């Protein structure tokens, strides 16, 4: 056994996977988690026995190592869930994957013909250059369908015009899906698009069950997971980290290790460095933007409301973006089977009216909106709670790539620091991609030479596998597909 020690900042999927892999290489990890629960945004919260996700998290991957880890942790604690998610727009449900008859019956023959004509127009004369989310979607779906299904929801999620969201994000989240692919699925019942997965695995007690098990295994094998321990300072000597300082209750603790792996937001990490980074790096860190998120859970005195796992709400007259039905993910999430527990998901930014609204007002807003949508009777809502999640989603705005390039170049100069995960790489990835980055970071500590910045989600959707390049050791750009949901996966 090695006497080396590593500090892992963040107890989400990336950080916990890194810590567990470090133990396999004989390196003792100490995980510092700011909150009182592991799992990050993949955690499971509880309220009066009701369990709910911070956004739904499906367990589906073609990355063999991740699959093996999941099975090692939970085994037969997984259940198989049939996926049903629909779009709610203009008082109607639209199937997803798209059904030709469903679209025509909801929109009518005339509007459907206009959508098809708009699609062919876009294919014949695509918008160039293709730089924004708006241009990317119009070129693949046509302007009419973009205006109907993509624009309202996406701007509700991100809080900025679609013309200001980079095409990178669309390319990452909508791999393999086009109007033609959707039509093929609707007419012939099949599709190769990775956005159209119909079944997935799910822990019977929610995704947090997975990360709680990781915590148990890490502690069982000699690692430490310190909860409520936010990092407030990262001390460096040139390009080497010498210690981190965490706040634990009313005291601060300085921890020293040989290696440091961080999944905290890049902006926070860089602004925590002591001494501070060069001015241009600080400015780049301040330029990264995030979208915040809150969920209002509603306990409703009805045994069954609708069959969907989740519904995307494109209706512009309400502010809710997505609605989870946790009983339809796993019946064990709801302790009383005569009740239903819904998660009303709102996308916001810290400081805006939604984020600052007190819990009682948010509860009343969610109750009014579920009633207005006709998905439940407001009078049947009995109870609920609110959970806020800051920095839930990295924003792909016009400036993010330039800022990230500056930060990446600076961080790659450190000899004992690696960043991983959605927040730690400012990448909109899924939990299995985050886990793989955690595995590779731990292996780098043990002597491997993976370029984590080359393990990117864009390559992962193409199922590319890179081998040796230019004399370097093998760099894997994800062994297989990290499955996207569709454009709606903004909230996943």
Image (cartoon, helix red, strand yellow):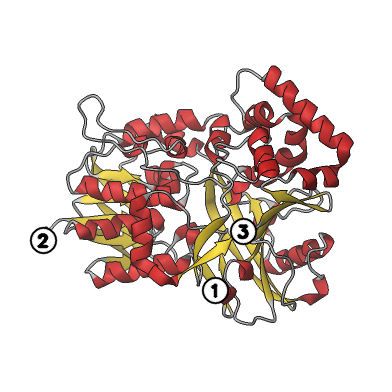
Q: Residue at x 87, y 38 (%)?
A: 109
Residue 293 vs 424, above or below: the answer is: below
Instruction: Please name which of the two marks, 3 or 1, marks the residue nearer to the observer.
Output: 1
**Residue 173: where, in percent of width, then height?**
55, 40
Q: Is residue 372 left or right of residue 277?
A: right
Residue at the disc numbered 2: 1
Disc 3/disc 1 C-alpha distance (Å): 15 Å
| Residue 90 visible to an observer of this rendering | yes
**Would you identify the image quadrant in which residue 149 lies?**
top right
Query: Answer yes or no: do the residues labelled 1 and 2 have beta carbons within 8 Å?
Result: no
Per the image, the residue denoted by label 3 is: 294
Q: Does dot 3 land on a helix, a strand or a loop?
A: strand
Name the quadrant containing residue 84: bottom right
Query: Could you say where residue 25 lies in the image, as x and y percent from the top left?
Result: 18, 56
Dot 2: element: loop
Q: Residue furthest front?
A: 188
Disc with the residue nearer the chain's start (3 vs 1): 1
Q: Identify which residue, 62 or 455, lies in the foreground.
A: 62
């Amino acid at each position: 056994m090695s006497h080396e020690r590593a500090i892992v900042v963040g107890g989400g999927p990336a950080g916990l996977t890194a810590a567990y892999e470090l133990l396999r290489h004989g390196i003792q990890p100490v995980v510092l988690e700011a909150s009182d629960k592991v799992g990050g945004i993949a955690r499971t919260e509880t309220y009066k026995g009701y369990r709910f996700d911070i956004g739904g998290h499906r367990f589906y991957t073609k990355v063999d190592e991740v699959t093996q880890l999941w099975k090692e942790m939970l085994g037969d604690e997984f259940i198989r869930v049939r996926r049903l998610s629909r779009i709610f727009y203009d008082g109607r449900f639209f199937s997803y994957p798209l059904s030709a008859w469903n679209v025509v019956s909801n929109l009518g023959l005339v509007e459907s013909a206009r959508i098809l004509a708009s699609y062919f127009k876009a294919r014949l004369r695509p918008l160039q250059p293709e730089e924004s989310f708006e241009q990317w979607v119009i070129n693949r779906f046509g302007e009419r369908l973009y205006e109907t299904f993509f624009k309202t929801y996406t701007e509700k999620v991100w809080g900025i015009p679609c013309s200001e969201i980079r095409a990178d994000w669309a390319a990452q989240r909508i791999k393999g899906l086009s109007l033609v692919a959707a039509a093929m699925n609707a007419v012939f019942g099949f599709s190769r698009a990775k956005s159209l997965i119909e079944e997935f695995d799910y822990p019977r007690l929610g995704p947090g069950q997975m990360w709680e098990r990781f915590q148990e295994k890490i502690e069982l094998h000699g690692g430490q997971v310190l909860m409520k321990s936010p990092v407030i300072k990262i001390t460096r000597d040139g390009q080497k980290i010498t210690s981190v300082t965490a706040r634990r209750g009313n005291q601060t603790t300085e921890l020293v290790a040989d290696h440091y792996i961080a999944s905290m937001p890049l902006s926070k990490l860089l602004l925590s460095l002591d001494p501070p980074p060069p001015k241009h790096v600080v400015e780049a860190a301040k330029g990264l933007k995030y979208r915040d998120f809150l969920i209002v859970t509603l306990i409703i005195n009805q045994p069954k409301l609708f069959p969907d796992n989740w519904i995307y709400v494109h209706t512009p007259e309400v502010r809710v973006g997505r609605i989870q039905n946790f009983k339809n993910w796993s019946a064990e999430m709801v302790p009383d089977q005569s009740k239903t527990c819904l998660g009303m998901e709102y996308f916001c930014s810290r400081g805006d009216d939604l984020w600052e609204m007190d819990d009682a007002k948010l509860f009343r807003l969610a109750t009014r909106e579920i009633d207005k949508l006709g998905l439940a009777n407001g009078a049947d809502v009995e109870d609920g709670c609110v959970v806020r999640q800051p920095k839930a989603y990295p924003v792909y705005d016009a400036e993010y790539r330039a800022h990230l390039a500056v930060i990446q170049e600076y961080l790659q100069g450190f000899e004992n620091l690696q960043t991983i995960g959605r927040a730690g790489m400012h990448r909109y990835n899924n939990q299995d991609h985050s886990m793989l980055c955690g595995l590779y970071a731990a292996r780098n500590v043990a002597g491997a030479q993976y370029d984590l910045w080359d393990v990117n989600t864009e390559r992962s959707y193409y199922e590319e596998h890179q081998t040796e390049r230019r004399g370097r050791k093998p760099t894997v750009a994800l062994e297989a597909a990290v499955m996207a949901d569709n454009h709606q996966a903004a909230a996943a």
